[in-house]
Amino acid sequence: MNGLIIALIVLVFWLVLVLLMLRGWRRRGQRQAEKVGDFPVVPDETGERRLGPETGLYVGSTFVPSWTDRLAVGDYGDRASCSISMFAQGILIERQGATSIWVPAASVRAIRTERGLAGKVMTRDGVLVIRWMLPSGTEIDSGVRCDDKSCYPRWVAHDPNSSE
């Protein structure tokens, strides 16, 4: 009987901790909402495909300059399987089971590789990171861990604002 009571107390304690974490994540998203504003919507015409699609895992988006300050607004902080493509008008990250992310070409500040992003730490150059500016003026880094990392040099070398 004592073992059952202890197990119930531990279970209730664990559930309270989980609920507190969820509450904290929601409050964080509410605090960030004004700073983030609205994400750009995917346009009807994206232009010519320049790179991709590459499959992988969207690891998240963070506020510049902190690689661990994860966005909690909407579902933009959620990891999801994805494909990433570069078009003449911008970059599209199509996430499975989550909102697609459109990065207009004029908003892209840099494309690089990093060891980690949004708390996901990999080997050297394990994450493809796109630094871009939201319409609100806030700079963020969005990261994708591609299944085929041999594509990273093409992405890093390609300037999405070029007139190729």
Image: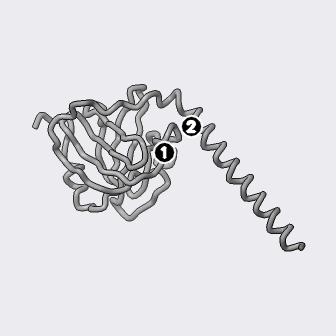
Confirm or deny contact between disc 1 and disc 2 (CB under 8 A).
yes
Q: Residues within 10 Å of mark 2 (few under 14, many from 20)?
A: many
Q: Amino acid at mark 1?
A: Gly
Residue 163, picture quadrant: top left
Q: Is residue 5 above or below residue 85?
A: below
Q: Amino acid at mark 2?
A: Gly
Q: Which mark is residue 148?
A: none
Residue 100, picture quadrant: top left
Which mark is first along the chain, 2 or 1? 2
Whether residue 127 sits left or right of residue 60 in the image: it is: left
Locate residue 49, reporting x and y percent.
Answer: 17, 42
Whether residue 3 sits left or right of residue 163 in the image: it is: right
Per the image, the residue denoted by label 2 is 29
Helix, strand or loop status at disc 1: loop
Residue at figure coordinates x 38%, y 65% from the top left: 123
* Real-space Cα separation, disc 1 to disc 2, in angstroms: 9 Å
Locate residue 145, reporting x and y percent.
Answer: 35, 56
Helix, strand or loop status at disc 2: helix
Locate residue 103, reporting x and y percent.
Answer: 31, 36
Per the image, the residue denoted by label 1 is 77
Residue at figure coordinates x 25%, y 30% from the top left: 44
The residue most toward the left is 164
Residue 141, picture quadrant: top left
Q: Is residue 134 above or below residue 25?
A: above
